[in-house]
Image: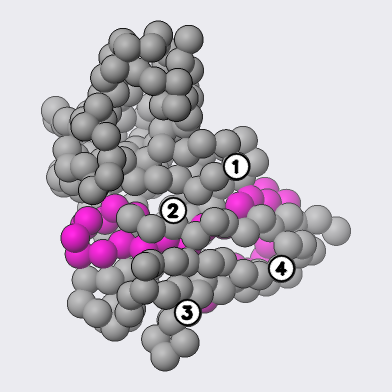
Amino acid sequence: QSALTQPASVSGSPGQSIIISCTGTSSDVGGYNYVSWYQQHPGKAPKLMIYEVSNRPSGVSNRFSGSKSGNTASLTISGLQAEDEADYYCSSYTSSSTLVFGGGTKLTVL
Amino acid sequence: QVTLRESGPALVKPTQTLTLTCTFSGFSLSTSGMCVSWIRQPPGKALEWLARIDWDDDKYYSTPLKTRLTISKDTSKNQVVLTMTNMDPVDTATYYCARISSSYNSAFDYWGQGTQVTVSS
């Protein structure tokens, strides 16, 4: 049960778009459309931003979008805002009926 | 309004057993499709999924920690309990409980605020 692979950090300027990747295997990301993305601000609990690869929960800005190709899922944040600066984690269901998280990506808004 | 709250000891000694309780409201764990998971996060590190219990009492565990974990539920009290045996300093972390509902398939839509556990003699 290895963690999904995410870049350690990404950055962008206000108004720009960034993409965070999440790479797994055919036993998790590639095998199921059950990839989720979470935003975590320092000292806070994670917040669900995307579920089932590309769906946004009610209340989440449409600046956040998700996609998947093969064993890699991606989170795109468009129109970057200062409040988007946070840690982001992907998660996937696995063939063992377990769940696995990515290593996390720190987003810096320059 | 859905809420979850973790409770348990802030400090445990190495080799001891940790018992954490997640007390929730706003939903019933006897409702089809509802699940509660435990997730932990060591200081400055990534989230790690630990265990899940479903409305029908199915249970799933992290493979590396399977032998140390037990998850259970008390539907009448709206509680989920996680026990972790043989605690070690590397188990120092914030422990969260979170809900999965059938609306979000394998996604955690509500989280507790977390409880910090330190393992030290």
Q: Which residue is mark 4?
A: B9
Q: Secondary structure at mark 4?
A: loop
Dots 1 and 3: beta carbons under 8 Å?
no
In the image, residue B35 above or below residue B105: below
Q: Which amino acid lies under the numbered mark 3 shown in the image of this protein? A: Gln
Chain of the residue on which disc 1 is drawn: A
Q: Which residue is mark 1?
A: A43
Chain of the residue on which disc 3 is drawn: B
**Residue closer to the observer: B76 or A69:** B76
Quarter residue B57 falls in: bottom left
B38 on left or right of A36: right
Label for residue B49?
A: 2
In the image, residue A35 above or below residue B101: above
Q: Which residue is mark 3?
A: B79
Taking the magenta stretch, the answer to whether it contains residue B96 is yes
**Residue closer to the observer: B63 or B33:** B33
Q: Nearer the viewer, mark 2 or mark 3?
A: 3
Dots 2 and 1: beta carbons under 8 Å?
no
